[in-house]
């Protein structure tokens, strides 16, 4: 989750204008999956902020948080973790332990542990984020919905399906109410609900939700965005579970091509997709013999 620079919230002061512009440009590059460009801009912004504002300024923490987000997308999990923890320490010193800005960092730490396949370690961070944000913003804010969704994914990874589904549906309802039915966050929520239904064995519902999520992502992000490829990969896994291996292989091949072009061949998501694709090909060869 990107943090919004304080200057962008309260009106740009002259000494912060350049930093807020760099942060906004970096966020735009992230949305387009141009992670190297985003990293370059944010490193520049962090250096300028430290020099002009001092290392304890909250804007420094905001920019470091956003750089950590980029590292997570790049698959550089250890670097992201170090940055998040530095940000958390800085904000606790300057703002206290219950300030709403800390919720974003807890959200991101939980999501990072989920990405590292350590959902049990991510759960305390995610629950802390929900608690802080709900007190600060109330029960119907989209930032809280994002926290619900992040916690749900972590619980899903621990097979705590009932609570995960309740949280996914709460998040989806808030996103639809605030943003309308054709928003990116709606697409992500549909993808996550599909994955949960697939794990529970309801493959018909899962496929319907995956296809709705994919249609939204293709429309909002484009057919070659790595986030679109994640849902393509998930739909391929569903097809394989149904024994539709030719369709699964086609989908995996498409997803793999997108991910390799966007993220490089060594990214963790590329490795997962490649392994899935190779497994389907091996299963197909075994059946044919």
Image (tube, grey):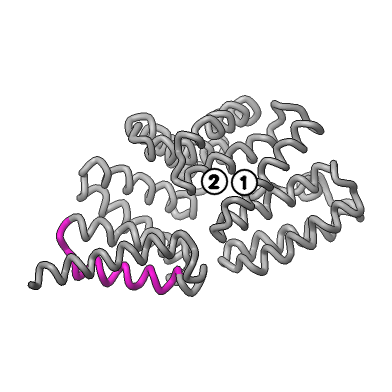
Q: Residue at x 68, y 47 (%)?
A: 83
Query: Residue 282 appears in which quarter of the rendering?
Result: bottom left
Residue count near mark 2 (Cα–Cα under 10 Å), binned few <14, some 14–19, many ≥20: many
Q: Position of residue 168 (x, y in %)?
A: 41, 38
Q: Residue at x 49, y 33 (%)?
A: 123
Magenta region, residue range: 242-259
Q: Position of residue 264 (x, y in %)?
A: 51, 71
Query: Residue 242 appears in which quarter of the rendering?
Result: bottom left
| On-image quarter of the C terminus | bottom left
Q: Residue at x 21, y 43 (%)?
A: 201
| Residue 88 part of the magenta-drawn span | no
- Disc 2 designates what residue? 112
* Residue 196 visible, this angle: yes
Viewer-nearest residue: 112 or 210: 112
Residue count near mark 1 (Cα–Cα under 10 Å), binned few <14, some 14–19, many ≥20: many
Q: Is residue 177 left or right of residue 21?
A: left
Q: Is residue 224 left or right of residue 137?
A: left
Residue 81 is labelled as 1
| Residue 251 part of the magenta-drawn span | yes
CA gap, disc 2 to disc 1? 7 Å
Q: Where 30 sits versus 160, above or below?
A: below
- Given contact means CB atoms under 8 Å apart, are the residues at marks 2 and 1 in contact? yes
* Residue 214 visible, this angle: no
């Amino acid at each position: 989750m990107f943090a919004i620079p304080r200057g962008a919230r309260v009106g740009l002061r002259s000494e912060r204008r350049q930093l807020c512009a760099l942060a906004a440009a970096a966020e735009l590059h992230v949305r387009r999956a141009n992670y190297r460009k985003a990293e370059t801009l944010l490193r520049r912004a962090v250096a300028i902020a430290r020099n002009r504002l001092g290392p304890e300024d909250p804007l420094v923490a905001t920019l470091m948080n956003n750089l950590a987000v980029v590292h997570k997308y790049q698959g550089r999990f250890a670097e992201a973790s170090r940055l998040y923890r530095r940000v958390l320490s800085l904000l606790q010193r300057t703002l206290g332990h219950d300030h709403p800005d800390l919720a974003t960092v807890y959200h991101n730490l939980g999501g990072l542990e989920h990405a590292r396949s350590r959902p049990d370690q991510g759960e305390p961070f995610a629950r802390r984020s929900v608690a802080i944000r709900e007190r600060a913003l109330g029960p119907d804010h989209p930032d809280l919905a994002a926290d619900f969704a992040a916690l749900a994914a972590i619980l899903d990874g621990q097979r705590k399906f009932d609570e995960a589904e309740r949280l996914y549906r709460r998040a989806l309802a808030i996103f639809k109410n605030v943003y309308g039915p054709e928003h990116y966050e709606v697409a992500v929520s549909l993808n996550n609900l599909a994955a949960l239904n697939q794990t529970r064995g309801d493959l018909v519902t899962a496929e319907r939700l995956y296809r709705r999520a994919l249609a939204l992502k293709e429309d909002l992000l484009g057919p070659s965005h790595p986030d679109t490829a994640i849902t393509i990969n998930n739909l391929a896994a569903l097809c394989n579970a149904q024994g539709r291996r030719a369709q699964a292989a086609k989908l995996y091949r498409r997803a793999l091509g997108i991910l390799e072009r966007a993220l490089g061949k060594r990214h963790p998501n590329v490795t997962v997709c490649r392994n899935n694709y190779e497994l389907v090909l091996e299963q197909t060869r075994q059946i044919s013999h």
